Image (tube, rainbow, N blue to C red):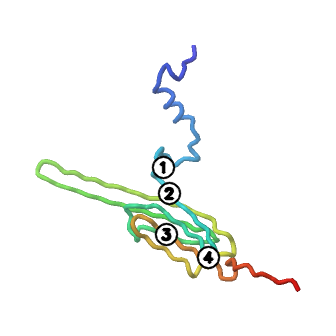
Amino acid sequence: MLLKNTDFPVLPNVFNDFFRDWSSTNFSDTNTTLPAVNIKNNENEFIVDVAAPGMNKDDFQINIENDILTISSEKKEDKEETNDNYTRKEYSYMSFKRSFTLPKGIVDYEKIKATYKNGELKISIPKLEALKSKTPKLIKVE
């Protein structure tokens, strides 16, 4: 006899976790292993916002190679507390790496800037002057 999902409420969760597509997840149901990223495209620039609370600006490495923007971070912390009766040692390790392909021939690489403030990494990627959209010109018919 086959079991119904309602017969054993624990089994559906076990089977759902086992058979789900692991290639498209961050190995966390809360999506906490990769920071959230928003990318905006406006007339003058691309803006990449990365939510990365608890980091320092020195924890980030940002580079562009072959029109691929790569943002990575690694942070390690070790804390040790020793008392007469016990020793407590805590450590944490956080890292991530995200890559994004930029449109070819549009980015002004010399003017890219990055800032980190209040848990948000903001990368401004200006477009080349020649490619910025200009105000439409009205042509009078004579």
State which tag comes first along the sequence, 2 or 4: 2
Of helix, strand and loop, which one carries label 2? loop
Amino acid at the residue labelled 2: Ala
Amino acid at the residue labelled 1: Asn
From the top left corner, tell me how far across and down residue 75 is, in percent. 39, 62
Label 3 CA crowd tier, 10 Å (few <14, some 14–19, many 20+)? some
In front: mark 3 or mark 1?
3
Of helix, strand and loop, which one carries label 3? strand
Answer left or right for 72 relative to 103: left
Amino acid at the residue labelled 4: Asn
- Image-quadrant location for residue 16: top right
Q: Is residue 134 above or below residue 91?
A: below
Q: Which residue is mark 2?
A: 36
Q: Which residue is mark 3?
A: 122
Amino acid at the residue labelled 3: Lys
Q: Which residue is mark 1?
A: 31
State which tag comes first along the sequence, 3 or 1: 1
Answer left or right for 80 relative to 131: left
Q: Residue at x 48, y 57 (%)?
A: 35
Q: Are marks 2 and 1 in contact (CB under 8 Å)?
A: yes
- Spatial CA distance of label 3 from label 4 is 15 Å
The label shown at residue 125 is none
From the top left corner, tell me how far across and down residue 121 is, in percent. 46, 67
State which tag comes first along the sequence, 2 or 1: 1
Label 2 CA crowd tier, 10 Å (few <14, some 14–19, many 20+)? few
Answer left or right for 55 relative to 128: left
- Spatial CA distance of label 3 from label 2 is 12 Å
Exactly how many numbered labels are in the figure?
4
Q: Which residue is mark 4?
A: 44
From the top left corner, tell me how far across and down residue 76 is, in percent. 36, 60
- Spatial CA distance of label 3 from label 1 is 20 Å
In front: mark 3 or mark 4?
4
